[in-house]
Image (spheres, grey):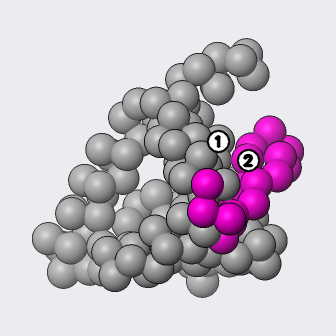
Amino acid sequence: MNLLRYVWAFPNTALGLLATLLTLATGGKVRRVAGTLEVHGGFARWFLGLPLFGAAAMTLGHVILGQEEWYLWMHRAHERAHVRQCEAWGIFFLPAYFLASLWAWVRGGHPYHDNWFEVMAEREAGTSPLPPP
């Protein structure tokens, strides 16, 4: 069962592994935490700092990128919720995530804060101001 979750999420994880290699090649660091790789510094810092993202952390399958190590610690519960989303949605996760952002924006909301995947990750992490469904 556990292996199937890794296989199903692998297309997303493959992107994360590429980011991991680029991060290591540019002086970043990686460590294994509870079945994921947490990657920070170097390329990850640069990539997440781009205006398109402007994020402290991001999940790609079983790889969690962070600008700095403390961001990974601070956002671990939220990012682990995204890992579980990747395990559930598999190859469809990234397209579904982007469609959820587009849907939020079309409805007049914020493409990140009103994205269904972000709202659910916040609820699961216990950091949402909204009550559970």
Question: Which mark is on residue 62?
Answer: 1
The image's mark for residue 36 is none
Q: Which residue matches tag 2?
A: 37
Sooner in the amino-acid sequence: mark 2 or mark 1: 2
The amino acid type found where label 2 is placed reads: Leu
- Please tell me which residue lies in front, 80 or 65: 65
Pick the quarter of the image with the N terminus.
top right
Mark 2 crowd level (few <14, some 14–19, many ≥20, 10 Å Cα): many
User: Which-is-in-front pick, marks 2 and 1?
Assistant: 2
Query: Which of the 4 image quarters holds residue 61?
Result: top right
Q: Is residue 43 magenta?
A: no
Q: Does the residue at mark 2 contact the one at mark 1 (Cβ under 8 Å)?
A: yes
Q: Which residues are magenta?
A: 25-41
Task: Indicate the position of residue 106 as horizontal and vertical percent values.
Answer: 14, 71
| Residue 39 among those drawn in magenta | yes
| In the foreground, 58 or 100 | 58
As measured in the structure, the alpha-carbon distance from the residue carrying label 2 to the one carrying label 1 is: 6 Å
Tell whether 39 sits left or right of 93: right
Residue 95 appears in the figure: yes
